[in-house]
Image (spheres, rainbow, N blue to C red):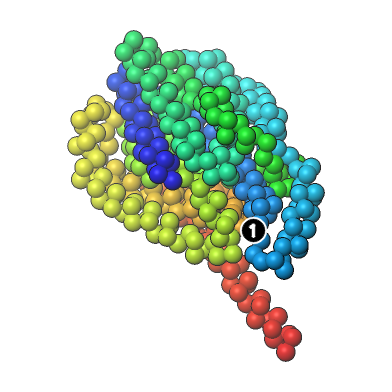
């Protein structure tokens, strides 16, 4: 996990630097368009992260069943029989990577068909290029999500870390080139999507990564696709709350907000959430695998991560209040710097979304896909309702990011707690009946 830790640090730094480079290389209006496009693309790739999560869960579960350890000689025959039965029963289960071609094609076509309805709100001067790039980028990212899920299930963390690092490194390098050469918004749109092709380089260079492409899921094709769709719906709401929140803010702000007017709020949202949520997003496959191993006591396994992100958010909020604005002043123009209070509160409430990510991973590992989806949909519905209130953009953003994720996490943890209590009481009732 050291490799992933180092990679997540690099990813966070690279993300900051790309945003900073864009703020220097583009006009205020162009910078706002880039930030919204950046948010939309990563929100949509967040939808596809459901494919990564379900692939990690399905392959990890199958490997645990088929590769179950034998405890003693008396049990050896039974376990060998069980393993043979599992192999026979699952011989026809799909390879997630093989199914990804169909998913990628569907995603690309959906983007192209629906794009004319929304692309004009994001990049009004580059609608054609913006739509083509986002469709190709999303189709490519579908394969990247699957490869990440396969690597996670196989505990191939160093390769996973290289994929993450190269993805962000390519974006940063091209952003610097675009800035140096004076290229404008189109170049930065290309920078946004280019990292989605990193999986091709990883597969070309790593025999171990190519070997994971043969792995199969734990269920047949139809249940796997059904669970994947549910995970994608939930991770889509997840992505709206994390990377796509800026898009939601623009859509709920109305036409009376002029070009560049939301630049400061969008920058504050992006920068204050990155230190907690970007690393947690990268660790989410590892969390799912960890919770899958401890599914019988998943709440206990989730307690420490929840406490940790809560403490980090609280400390980070205090630090942001005193330090964020002065630090931003060293790199950003005054037009995109929010007040110390806004920066502090946004950092603090990012902890609510982080807790929802952990509770959602626990629900997914416990094979409660509907609960996972419900928690995120509740969060996005409540956050959208708050954003439509008649307050300043900063106030609406802070309350939306506090209320929605908190209620969604409470629902998920509450249902998991009730399920755990029911499981604990069941043996007692059984013994009483036998007596």
**Residue 80 higher or lower than 19, as above or below:** below
Image side of residue 25 versus residue 372, left or right = left
**Residue at x 43%, y 57% (from the top left corner):** 306
Image side of residue 253 versus residue 344, left or right = right
User: Which quadrant holds the C terminus?
Assistant: bottom right
**Residue at x 21%, y 42% (from the top left corner):** 323
**What secondary structure is found at the residue carrying circle 1?**
loop
**Residue 158 higher or lower than 140, as above or below:** below
- Residue 253 in percent (x, y) is at 43, 35
- Residue 47 in percent (x, y) is at 57, 37
Q: Quadrant of residue 22?
A: top left
In the rendered image, which residue does mark 1 sit on? 69
**Residue 299 higher or lower than 125, as above or below:** below
The residue closer to the viewer here, 294 or 259, is 294
Q: Is residue 330 visible?
A: yes
- Residue 381 in percent (x, y) is at 53, 47
- Residue 213 in percent (x, y) is at 64, 34
**Residue at x 55%, y 51% (from the top left corner):** 289
**Residue at x 70%, y 80% (from the top left corner):** 430
The residue closer to the viewer here, 49 or 215, is 215
The residue closer to the viewer here, 400 or 55, is 55
Q: Quadrant of residue 116?
A: top right
**Would you call the spot at circle 1 few (<14 residues within 10 Å), some (14-19), or many (20 or more)?**
few
Image side of residue 257 versus residue 239, left or right = left
Number of marks drawn? 1
Q: Quadrant of residue 428?
A: bottom right
């Amino acid at each position: 996990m050291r490799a992933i830790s180092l990679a997540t640090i690099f990813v966070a730094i690279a993300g900051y630097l790309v945003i900073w480079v864009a703020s220097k290389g583009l006009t205020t209006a162009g910078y706002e368009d880039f930030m919204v496009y950046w948010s939309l693309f990563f929100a949509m790739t967040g939808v596809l992260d459901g494919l990564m999560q379900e692939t990690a869960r399905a392959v990890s579960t199958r490997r645990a069943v088929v590769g179950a350890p034998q405890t003693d000689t008396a049990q050896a025959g039974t376990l060998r029989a069980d393993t043979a039965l599992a192999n026979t029963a699952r011989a026809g289960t799909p390879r997630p990577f093989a199914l990804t071609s169909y998913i990628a094609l569907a995603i690309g076509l959906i983007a192209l068909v629906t794009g004319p309805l929304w692309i004009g709100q994001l990049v009004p001067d580059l609608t054609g290029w913006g739509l083509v790039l986002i469709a190709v980028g999303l189709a490519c990212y579908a394969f990247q999500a699957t490869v990440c899920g396969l690597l996670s299930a196989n505990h191939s963390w160093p390769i996973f870390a290289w994929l993450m690092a190269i993805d962000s490194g390519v974006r940063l390098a091209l952003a610097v080139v675009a800035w140096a050469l004076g290229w404008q918004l189109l170049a930065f749109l290309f920078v946004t999507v280019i990292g989605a092709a990193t999986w091709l380089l990883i597969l070309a260079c790593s025999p171990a990564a190519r070997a994971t492409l043969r792995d199969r899921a734990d269920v047949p094709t139809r249940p796997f696709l059904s669970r994947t769709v549910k995970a994608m719906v939930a991770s889509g709401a997840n992505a709206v709350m994390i990377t796509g929140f800026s898009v939601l803010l623009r859509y709920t702000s109305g036409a009376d907000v002029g070009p560049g007017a939301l630049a400061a709020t969008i920058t504050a949202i992006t920068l204050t959430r990155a230190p907690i949520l970007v690393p947690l997003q990268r660790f989410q496959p590892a969390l799912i695998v960890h919770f899958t191993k401890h599914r019988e006591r998943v709440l206990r396994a989730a307690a420490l991560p929840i406490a940790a992100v809560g403490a980090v958010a609280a400390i980070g909020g205090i630090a942001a209040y005193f330090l964020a604005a002065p630090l931003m002043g060293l790199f950003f123009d005054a037009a995109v710097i929010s007040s110390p209070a806004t920066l502090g509160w946004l950092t603090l409430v990012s902890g609510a979304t982080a807790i929802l990510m952990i509770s959602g991973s626990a629900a997914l590992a416990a094979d409660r896909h509907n609960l996972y989806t419900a928690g995120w949909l509740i969060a996005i519905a409540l956050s959208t309702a708050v954003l439509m209130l008649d307050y300043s953009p900063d106030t609406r953003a802070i309350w939306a990011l506090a209320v929605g994720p908190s209620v969604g996490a409470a629902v998920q943890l509450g249902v998991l707690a009730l399920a755990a209590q029911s499981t604990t009481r069941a043996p007692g009732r059984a013994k009483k009946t036998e007596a």
